[in-house]
Amino acid sequence: MKRIILHVGTHKTGSSTIQETLFRQRHRLTEAGLHYLSIGANHWDLYSAFMDEPWEWFENRRRGLDRAQVDARNRHTLDVVRAEIENTPCPWVMISAEHLSMLPSHAIEALRDWLAPLGEVQVVYFVRQIESWIASDSQQCAKVGIRARPTPYTVAIQRLFDFPVAWLEAFGKRRVSLVRFEDALQTGLTDTLLALAGLPGLAALGMEEMRFNESISAEAVECFYCLNRIAPVGKTGRNEHLVGLLMSMPGSKYRAAALSQAEVEDHNRKMNRLRARYHLDLYPALHYRGEDDGRAPFSEDALYYLVNTLNDTMNRLEALESQVSERVGP
């Protein structure tokens, strides 16, 4: 029977790095006995196949698919994945999609039951210290244009507590590995995942880890929040040249705002519940630090970059207008 590693993320725990590294070098993995699904680096189409109302998912709407087309695509995805798992000679198969972490309990159970005849499943869920996760997710959502303010605590605690518990309940603790992102960084994100399959690390396989989703500065994040309010993604008036300039904006490292006392207490309560129920000691208790988190104001270097860039852009526009006027004449 096949052994299936089901890597479900979560978001902002190095998933893109792992996925791109394994997908782009998957032929070497095959030689080592691991089959990485060929349906893309990120196997998020499986999320569409098991989520509620997949025709409402932003990715399917972005593709312009109607309900019938989404249903047909989902059926095709399941057929392809089933065939790959059944037909590969490799003893190990890896599925990776951080969107899977967000499935509700009944959908996780449906995925579990669908995979059961195909192999023995081991779920791998990467967790991350909550303040660090909020900072990383905030800047990611800012730069892709889906939020105009920082990620709230209520979203973050789901990734650290609610979502992992749903997977633990569906599969049982023996079949779910919760991996601390901070530990995986020390041993290598991809190497950590390969080790769970009993495979050698990337160096031994003649492979290298590829880094993706690099962070942007705190000043860039704040500018993106403004841009996302003024010209949201998908709306007219959003200048992609400006987006590119903001991505390169210098400045300090983005930090999340301090958690409130109620949020700190809620976090500590839930970490204690993980210890008591599942004997999982993920993160120590947080301490309330007050409302002043000491974040640095907008840096002088960032302001200089922004003003200088806008000045150069205006000069180019004026030069272009002058050239057009000379050609057209009075």
Image: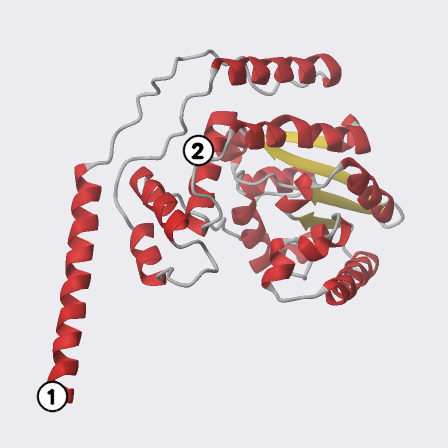
The residue that disc 2 covers is: 135
**Amino acid on which the number 2 mark rests in the picture:** Ala
Residue 329 tag number = 1
Q: Is disc 1 placed on a helix, strand or loop?
A: loop
Q: Position of residue 244 (x, y in %)?
A: 33, 57
Q: Is residue 150 above or below residue 249?
A: above
Q: Position of residue 103 (x, y in %)?
A: 72, 41
Q: Is residue 193 above or below residue 262?
A: below
Q: Is disc 2 placed on a helix, strand or loop?
A: helix
Q: Is residue 27 visible to the viewer in this orientation of the structure?
A: no
Q: In the rendered view, how is the structure colored? A: secondary structure
Q: What residue lies at 17% left-to-right and 75% top-to-bottom?
A: 320
Q: Quadrant of residue 140?
A: top left
Q: Position of residue 46 (x, y in %)?
A: 72, 53
Q: What residue lies at 17% left-to-right and 82% top-to-bottom?
A: 324
How many residues crowd around disc 2 within 10 Å: few (fewer than 14), some, or many (20 or more)? many
Query: Which circle's residue, 1 or 2, is located before the other in the chain?
Result: 2
CA separation in Å, label 1 and label 2: 54 Å
Q: Where's the C terminus, which quadrant?
A: bottom left
Instruction: Judge by depth and name the residue closer to the eye, 289 or 283.
Output: 289
Q: Quadrant of residue 256?
A: top left
Q: Relative to 164, is 267 on the left or the right?
A: left
Q: What residue lies at 44% left-to-right and 35% top-to-bottom?
A: 150
Q: Relative to 306, is 9 on the left or the right?
A: right
Instruction: Judge by depth and name the residue closer to the eye, 315 or 40.
Output: 315
Q: Is residue 104 visible to the viewer in this orientation of the structure?
A: yes
Q: Position of residue 36 (x, y in %)?
A: 68, 55
Q: Relative to 181, is 228 on the left or the right?
A: left
